[in-house]
Amino acid sequence: MHTVGTLTPETEAEAREAYDTVGPTAQLVVKEVARSMDFDREEYRERVDSDVVETARDVLFAAELAVHVGTREEYENWREEFDGEVFETGTENVEHVAWHAAPFAGEAVAATFQNEEDAAVGTLRRQALGRIYRDRL
């Protein structure tokens, strides 16, 4: 078993603080991407709104979430110890699972996979953002 990412907020306030912290970076990323696309000021104002920056912020936040990756057996052992609801996607007939838990929320998400770890981790992070964090942030 191994972990990808480092963000493991212990409280809702810590999650919100981490989300707030990536805000300026999200704005900078959006601005630089628009510049590389040769947006002038008018086009920037027309096309880049708060939803665009919020999407970048969501991605930056989710990209740092700690995701545990292991065998089905390692996941089942962890799940026995987790005192909360787990939203699992995928099939039981594969060998690996990626999961992220937010104990302060009493929730976790898990995604099964056979070979594509990077894809599973990316999917899981989007699920964690949507199911656990979005309403709290």
Image (spheres, rainbow, N blue to C red):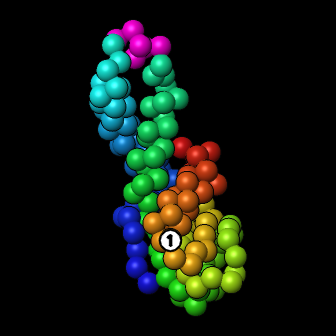
Q: What is the x, y in percent for residue 82?
A: 60, 78
Q: Quadrant of the N terminus?
A: bottom left
Q: What is the x, y in percent for residue 6?
A: 36, 64
Residue at left offset 34%, top offset 11%: 41
Q: Quadrant of residue 126?
A: bottom right
Q: Quadrant of the C terminus?
A: top right
| Residue occupied by mark 1 | 116
Residue at left offset 33%, top offset 13%: 40
Pick the residue in front: 119 or 110.
119
Residue at left offset 39%, top offset 69%: 4
Q: What is the x, y in percent for residue 73?
A: 58, 90
Residue 21's place in the image compared with 28, above or below, is below
Pick the residue in front: 123 or 3.
123
- Mark 1 Cα within 10 Å, few/some/many (few <14, many 20+)? few
Q: What is the x, y in percent for residue 36?
A: 29, 28
Q: Quadrant of residue 29?
A: top left
Start-end of magenta stretch: 41-46
Residue 34's place in the image compared with 77, above or below, is above
Q: Is residue 107 visible to the viewer in this orientation of the structure?
A: yes
Q: Main secondary structure of the magenta part?
A: helix
**Callout 1 amino acid:** Glu
Pick the residue in front: 100 or 90.
90
Query: Does dot 1 land on a helix, a strand or a loop?
Result: loop
Residue 119's place in the image compared with 55, above or below, is below
Residue situated furthest top in the rendering:
42
Residue 17 on the magenta segment: no
Q: Is residue 94 left or right of residue 102?
A: right
Q: Is residue 97 visible to the viewer in this orientation of the structure?
A: no
